Image (cartoon, rainbow, N blue to C red):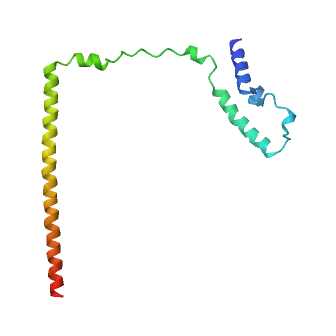
Amino acid sequence: VLANDVRHQQEMLWGFRKVEGGVVQRLGKSSVEGETDGTISEFRENQRLAAFASFLSHAPPLNARRLLTPLPRRRPRCTPAAAMADVSERTLQLSVLVAFASGVLLGWQANRLRRRYLDWRKRRLQDKLAATQKKLDLA
């Protein structure tokens, strides 16, 4: 009895009924819609019905959500305020000092590399200029 009630709800919701032999009928179609037999729109409608028939045979019943078990509860993560309460003042000062020192060291090395590159580029351009001037003097 419950399965028939669920099936009736599905029919009313989707507007389709599956009858004997796996044939799907559309509910509530009237001749006022202006469709006659054999038109292209009727052919497309039949294709949609065939696709929907395969969906109906595999669709879960409407009461399937009641049969599912609830998700397990996850342990709540600690909030940032609680996480900061675990860190001592000394550890915090030390971590800030290490972060600052590493930033200074990386900045110093990056600036050294940049200066070396700029010096190399300057030397290379000066050498090219000298070679070009020598070619012009010879010509």
For the point 67% across and 32% down, the residue is: 54
For the point 71% across and 37% down, the residue is: 48
* Front position in the image: 6 or 87: 87
* Front position in the image: 48 or 101: 101
Q: Position of residue 75 (x, y in %)?
A: 36, 15
Q: Position of residue 84 (x, y in %)?
A: 24, 19
> Viewed as shown, does residue 4 lie left or right of 31?
left
* Front position in the image: 114 or 62: 114
Image quadrant where residue 81 sits: top left
Q: Residue furthest top?
A: 1
Q: Is residue 66 above or below residue 97?
A: above
> Viewed as shown, does residue 129 lie left or right of 53?
left
- How many numbered marks, from 0 up? 0
Image quadrant where residue 67 sits: top right
Q: Is residue 94 above or below residue 75?
A: below
Q: Position of residue 21 (x, y in %)?
A: 76, 28
Q: Position of residue 40 (x, y in %)?
A: 79, 46
Q: Is residue 5 above or below residue 101?
A: above
Position of the C terminus, as image quadrant, is bottom left
Position of the N terminus, as image quadrant, is top right
Q: Is residue 62 above or below residue 95?
A: above
For the point 74% across and 29% down, the residue is: 22
> Viewed as shown, does residue 32 lie left or right of 56?
right
For the point 77% across and 26% down, the residue is: 20
